[in-house]
């Protein structure tokens, strides 16, 4: 099965209106899919991280990676990933290069499943658990009252775990009052504080009974500093969304920086790298919870990974819907559990009509050709 075409497809599907506005909505309203075609008539779909720089990620795929894959055997996933990682080394081992590589990796796994007629979770070793619990991941909101309103609505929708993205104690307290103690609350602060400030804030947050405190330290790779926070608070510490490769996670584990590792399939280097991170995490008794604030193949791949990996307690699920479903058969959440189609590959082919309607415009009158 030879690769005949590789292309990145930038989209701009906005966040659906109807909930409080968020400063994050604009960047989340841009997505990048990766499409790989083969001479067997099969097409694989992947997703690359695109927050804030979708066209840059597309250029890496189209100009650097695609020419290296044309004519190659699509089933040689590990060999391709090793080669492409070496090519991308000059750009660093995190960031745009790894985002693009992740999209390629997911599309290759999708192809592998389709070629064999099995879902990707079966290729990853079969089901380690019959279903996966979801936690709803909220946007960041301007006021604590908005936080409480959205948290209450998500709890009423059946979520038994909800993650906030605030940086103040009041919003967390309001959310706790809104959902009660029967719903788990997590808090992702997105790397705002110096170590001493993070320790102070963690202690102030302890009465809220958080399931975890995520990325409280700037910069995110300050794993020694993060370990100091972890030692100073009773709240479990989560991190890793912004890390890439198993080597990056090994440094975090060696520092004792986290209770919960959060590799993101569209940032870490794809499913191939996620599997390596999971093995390392198991060797040091660190729980893995995939970061997965995605709507397409990235979310689907995270669910397949969780189904096939022992000890994964949740998958992140976006708490805000897109204006139109990115996938022909979307990943859904029902009664607090993720629902995914049991079809060959990732089961995450996009809706062609949505691709056409929401293609990302490149200046006046120009757009990507999606055919």
Image (spheres, helix red, strand yellow):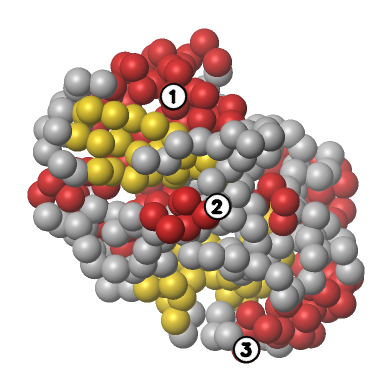
Mark 2 residue element: loop
Task: Identify the residue shown where x is 29% and y is 29%.
Answer: 5
Task: Identify the residue shown where x is 87% and y is 72%.
Answer: 144
* Distance Cα–Cα, label 2 vs label 3: 31 Å
Query: Is 317 placed above or below 345 here?
Result: below
Task: Identify the residue shown where x is 56% and y is 80%.
Answer: 159
Q: Dot 1: few (<14), some (14–19), or many (≥20) neighbours within 10 Å? A: some
The furthest residue to the front: 365
Give the residue number, with chain letter if any, for mark 2. Answer: 358
Query: The N terminus appears in which quarter of the rendering?
Result: top left
Give the residue number, with chain letter if any, for mark 1. Answer: 62
Mark 3 residue element: helix
Residue situated in front as seen by the camera: 53 or 242? 53
Q: Which mark is residue 156?
A: 3
Q: Is residue 135 left or right of residue 339?
A: right
Query: In x, y percent, where is residue 261?
Result: 52, 49
């Amino acid at each position: 099965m030879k690769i005949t075409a590789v292309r990145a497809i930038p989209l701009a599907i906005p966040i659906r209106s109807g909930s409080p506005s968020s400063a994050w909505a604009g960047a989340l309203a841009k997505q990048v899919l990766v499409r790989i075609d083969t001479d067997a008539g099969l097409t694989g779909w992947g997703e690359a991280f695109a927050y804030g720089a979708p066209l840059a990620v597309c250029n890496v795929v189209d100009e650097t990676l695609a020419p290296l894959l044309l004519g190659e055997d699509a089933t040689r996933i590990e060999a391709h990933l090793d080669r492409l990682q070496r090519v991308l080394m000059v750009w660093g081992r995190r960031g745009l290069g790894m985002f693009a590589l992740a999209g390629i990796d997911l599309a290759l796994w999708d192809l592998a499943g389709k070629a064999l007629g099995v879902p990707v979770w079966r290729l990853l070793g079969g089901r380690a658990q019959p279903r996966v619990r979801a936690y709803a991941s909220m946007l960041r909101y301007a006021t604590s009252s908005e936080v409480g309103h959205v948290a209450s609505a998500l709890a009423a929708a059946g979520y038994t775990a909800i993650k906030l993205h605030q940086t103040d104690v009041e919003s967390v307290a309001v959310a706790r009052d809104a959902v009660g103690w029967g719903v788990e609350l997590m808090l992702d602060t997105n790397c705002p504080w110096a170590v001493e400030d993070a320790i102070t804030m963690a202690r102030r947050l302890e009465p809220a009974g958080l399931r975890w405190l995520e990325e409280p330290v700037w910069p995110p790779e300050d794993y020694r500093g993060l370990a100091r926070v972890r030692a100073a608070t009773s709240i479990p510490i989560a991190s890793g969304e912004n890390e890439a490769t198993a080597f990056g996670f090994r440094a975090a584990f060696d520092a004792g920086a986290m209770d919960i590792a959060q590799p993101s399939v569209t940032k870490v280097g794809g499913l191939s790298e996620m599997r390596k991170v999971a093995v390392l995490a198991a060797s040091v008794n660190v729980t893995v919870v995939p970061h997965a604030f995605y709507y397409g193949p990235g979310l689907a791949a995270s669910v397949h990974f969780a189904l096939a990996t022992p000890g994964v307690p949740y998958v992140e699920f976006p708490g805000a819907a897109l204006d139109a479903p990115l996938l022909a058969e979307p990943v859904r959440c029902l009664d607090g559990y993720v629902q995914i189609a049991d079809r060959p590959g990732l089961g995450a082919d996009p809706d062609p009509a949505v691709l056409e309607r929401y293609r990302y415009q490149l200046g006046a009158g120009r757009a990507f050709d999606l055919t």
